[in-house]
Image (cartoon, helix red, strand yellow):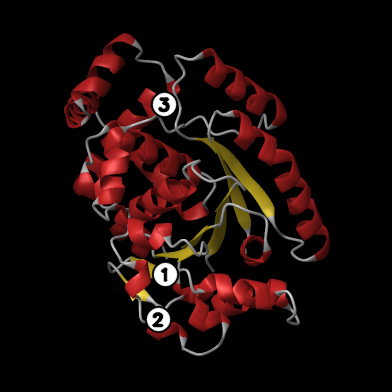
Amino acid sequence: MANIVSFIIQKGGCGKTTTTVNSAGYLARQGYKVLAVDMDPQGNMTQHFGYDSDALENSLVHLFLKKKPFDEVLIKREENLHILPNNIEMTTVEYTLYKSMSREYILRDILTPVMNEYDFILIDCPPNLGILSINSLVASTEFMLVVSPEFFPMRAIKPLYETYLMIKSKLNHTLQLKGVVMTMCDFRTRHAQEVRNILQKNFPHKLYQAFIRNNVALKEAASRGQSIFEFDPRSIGAFDYQNFAEEFLREYEPARKKRQYYDNFFSNLANQEQHDILQFAKKNLTAYIQHRLEWHENAPVLREALIIERNKILEKIKPYRNYSIHDE
């Protein structure tokens, strides 16, 4: 059954869509079956994946109105990456939903029949706490707070958390806060450092170690209708989203088993083999990251990046899928 995760903050321009798209892109590349759901009538996620939202013949609004079957709305962008697109037509439906019965459960009812077909369903929420965002949270098992280090997004956290508690109490008892990720970061500024300290104090076990820095490649990828891993896999943006997605996966049982498998395999290799693999893994990192590793070898994010590259090499030597099939 899929893990359904909403990416949310009721403030535009904080990186929700960028984070949803690049998380979906990375997870799909790792072999997970992913459905990305665009719940924002602006259709930014749909556009980020390279589709003209205004030209769509079918969109999420047709599922909400029960005018089209799921398969006719679904876009199969890649084998492991499917999309439910959205566009401005959804704004006309949004107002009528307030008068309908069970209006908070429409998205949940749309997704329930296909939950066993995906590992992850990622929902890009609108920048408000209206009925569409409530639908997203009611349908979700977890949600991610996406926060940029600015004044207004910080002010948005309290009412969002209160909404979460209301939904958990009355509409979705199993909903959990998965984590808080910082986007558009520049920790050379005192303000960004202060925001991270505040988040660390208020969400000590939920604030992700990984964070997303300002990077022009992320904007260029969006303009090309691609994920950062398609557009520039060796960019700082790809490095940051890789680290975020790996941290995102850490609590997912299949991912934990895979990580443990390669940790055990690596530890049983001869010292020279370990050294050679790590040296090769370092060469696969960008020159920027290689330079930082030389000076900050024990930095958690850099060390994690090296382990990810190491495991990519080990995957070619001894594929985990062969072990997991045999294990089952």
- Give the label, 3 or 1, closer to the camera: 1
The residue positioned 36% from the left and 70% from the top of the image is 54
For badge 3, the amino acid type reads Val
For badge 2, the amino acid type reads Asn
Element on which disc 3 rests: helix
Q: Earlier in the sequence, mark 2 or mark 3?
A: 2
Q: Residues within 10 Å of mark 2 (few under 14, many from 20)?
A: many
Please say whether residue 294 is visible from this viewpoint.
yes
Examine the image and state in which quarter residue 104 appears. Answer: bottom right
Residue located beneath label 2 in the image: 58
Q: Position of residue 138 (x, y in %)?
A: 68, 65
Q: Earlier in the sequence, mark 1 or mark 2?
A: 2
Q: Which mark is residue 301?
A: 3
Q: Is residue 47 above or below residue 62?
A: above
Q: CA distance from mark 3 to mark 1?
A: 33 Å
Q: Are marks 1 and 2 in contact (CB under 8 Å)?
A: yes
Q: Which mark is residue 85?
A: 1
Q: Which mark is residue 283?
A: none
Q: CA distance from mark 2 to mark 3?
A: 41 Å
Q: Position of residue 86 (x, y in %)?
A: 45, 69
Q: Are marks 3 and 1 in contact (CB under 8 Å)?
A: no
Q: Residues within 10 Å of mark 1 (few under 14, many from 20)?
A: many
The residue positioned 51% from the left and 29% from the top of the image is 209
For badge 1, the amino acid type reads Pro
Q: CA distance from mark 1 to mark 2?
A: 8 Å
Q: Position of residue 129 (x, y in %)?
A: 67, 55
Q: Is residue 240 above or below residue 173?
A: above
Q: Is residue 135 above or below residue 146?
A: below
Q: Are marks 2 and 3 in contact (CB under 8 Å)?
A: no
